Amino acid sequence: MSLTRKDVHVELTLTNGSVLKGTMVIERTSRLSDTLNKRDKDFIVLSDYEQNHHIINKRNILKVVEIEHLELEDQ
């Protein structure tokens, strides 16, 4: 567990219709929206629940929904 970062569970819908669920690591003092709106970063990294890492251009993200921990147990 990092003191400067935190895990956020998300569901991403991409412009091609794909839906990915996984974890993003963001700054502890930032909100998810702050991270997505940063102009100096064009890509985000999503770690899915099979331990695959996806580098995604933010331009290809259509929708982001933060997932509560309880929703993850239904998978």
Image (spheres, grey):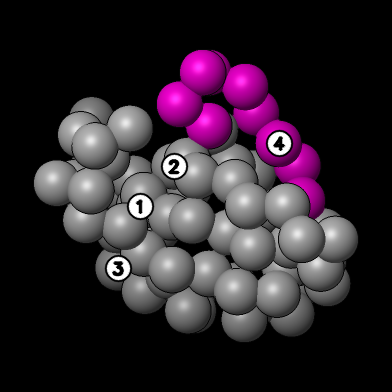
Question: Label 1 near label 2: C-beta < 8 Å?
Answer: yes
**CB under 8 Å between callouts 3 and 1?**
no
Q: Which residue in the protein does label 1 denote?
A: 8
Disc 2: CA contacts within 10 A as few (<14), some (14-19) or many (>=20): many
- The amino acid at mark 1 is Val
Residue 19: percent from left, percent from top: 63, 52
Amino acid carrying label 2: it is Thr
Marking on residue 54: 4
Specify few, some or many for label 1: CA neighbours under 10 Å numbering under 14, 14-19, or 20 or more: some
Residue on which the image places disc 3:
29
Amino acid type, label 3: Thr
- Depth check: give the residue in front, 39 or 53: 53
Q: Which residue is mark 2?
A: 23
What separation in Å lies between label 3 and label 1 (alpha carbons)? 12 Å
Alpha carbon separation for disc pair 2 and 4: 10 Å
Q: Reading the chain from its start, which is encountered first: label 4 or label 3?
A: 3
Q: Secondary structure at mark 2?
A: strand
Vertical placement of residue 35 versus 53, above or below: below
Whether tag 4 and tag 1 are in contact, CB under 8 A, the answer is no
Q: CA distance from mark 2 to mark 1?
A: 5 Å
Q: Secondary structure at mark 1?
A: strand
In terms of sequence position, does the residue under pointer 4 or pointer 1 come before the other? 1
